[in-house]
Image: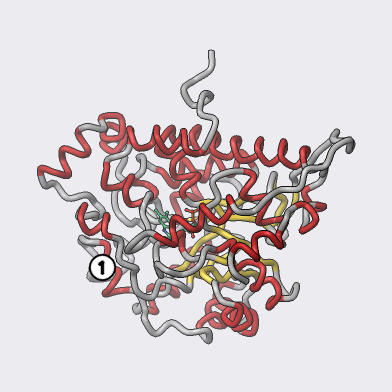
Amino acid sequence: MPTALDRMLTIDDLKRRAKRRVPKMFFDYADSGSWTEGTYRDNEADFQKIRLRQRVAVNMEGRTLRTQMMGEEVAMPVALAPTGLTGMQIADGEIKAAKAAEKFGVPFTLSTMSICSIEDIAEHTTRPFWFQLYVMRDREFIYRLIDRAKAAKCSALVLTMDLQVLGQRHKDLRNGLSAPPKFTPKHVWQMATRPLWAFGMLGTQRRTFRNIHGHVSGAADLGSLSAWTASQFDPTLSWSDVRWIKERFGGPVIVKGVLDPEDAKLAIANGADAIIVSNHGGRQLDGAPSSIRVLPEILDAVNGAVDVYLDGGIRSGQDVLKAVALGAKGAFIGRAFLYGLGAGGEAGVTRALEIIQREMDITMALMGERDIHNVGPHNIYSNDLLRRQGY
Ligand SMILES: Cc1cc2nc3c(=O)[nH]c(=O)nc-3n(C[C@H](O)[C@H](O)[C@H](O)COP(=O)(O)O)c2cc1C
């Protein structure tokens, strides 16, 4: 008997199911960009402009998507992006997503702003995961946070550089988003109309930012996310910080949030081991170009010095292949896995990964490729993309 999740054929199917199961304020938190949401929309729309080259009568047997990311074996070149408040999409969300990623064989990245802590994830997984760092004013706290990631054997640190101040997201402000949730009649109603979610939440103690709560003074009640972020995130963060962070962590540092070729060069000059071309899923500078649009110029600037990854707008296996064809070593997915999580917990994340994997596999075959390592510019009409975008 196929389950409801088996009938989900696209990430969009999972999104619709998540919307029915996750309280509005948390679903909206995932499905939002800053201001007009123009960059959020472009991230997805610009993938649609790239056309794939069909080849026929090529032996398609024995295909493989297996490759490496940061020297680690992966089932396909896809990693779970760090997302805050993931444990509010469903109870213990980060643990569930990390377990799904581990079983599938792709990296999981835990956000600083997660509900489940670094230690929670370490306790529930057996292989190393990645940790995403936001640099805050309280440096003692950041030192300890890096040390905790190290103690949990995190095998890479993802250093996010594009959130020194928070881009304004209208939905979050209108919804009064906070963690733990407030208990106004509006919020109680949103939660009460999602009974499965509510029962799950009643069954867990993990309802606040556990990487932070109890580890930093003055954060007993985190209250409004935007107010707290405004007071804690370090607006003086600079490229020179990459060095001491790297030294303290002692492992590879992936710099996330690069959208400009000059910044890519600066990241590398300051020790980045890899970069993620990202506009934070359209949640920070609205009006910035989509990630896929700037990928080619950043690859030119990097000139093979480090691996370049991309995130933003990946909703299918085809999107991953397009990024890889343009030269990315892999892609990170944010909302694609969050919708799976909201739709069906660990099994829902597995389903999201299966959807992406199957689509990559079949698409690769129809492009006449058997090995992901052979996918390249010859598989797409990239000139088309550049011309349409006015380059
Ligand atoms: C709900 C949500 C929360 C996010 N929280 C974080 C975070 O805590 N740290 C971070 O570096 N990026 C965060 N991001 C950005 C993601 O890591 C990633 O850049 C983005 O989701 C990619 O776009 P996509 O969702 O279209 O795949 C968040 C994104 C979403 C959707």
- Label 1 CB, ligand 1: below 8 Å? no
Q: Is residue 23 left or right of residue 272?
A: left
Identified at 65% across, 44% down, the residue is 105
Task: State the count of labels.
Answer: 1
Identified at 58% across, 65% down, the residue is 389
Q: Secondary structure at mark 1?
A: helix
Task: Identify the residue under disc 1.
Answer: 228
Whether 102 is drawn above or below 269: the answer is above
Identified at 64% across, 79% down, the residue is 268
Q: Is residue 341 left or right of residue 273?
A: left
Q: Is residue 360 left or right of residue 49?
A: right
The amino acid on which the numbered mark 1 sits, given as a three-letter code, is Trp
Residue 344 rendering spot, x and y as whole percentages: 43, 32
Q: Quadrant of residue 91?
A: top left
Identified at 61% across, 49% down, the residue is 319
* Colour treatment of the image: secondary structure
Residue 41 rendering spot, x and y as whole percentages: 44, 55
Whether 292 is drawn above or below 189: the answer is below
Residue 342 rendering spot, x and y as whole percentages: 40, 38
Residue 195 rendering spot, x and y as whole percentages: 25, 29
Looking at the rendering, the quadrant in which ligand 1 lies is bottom left
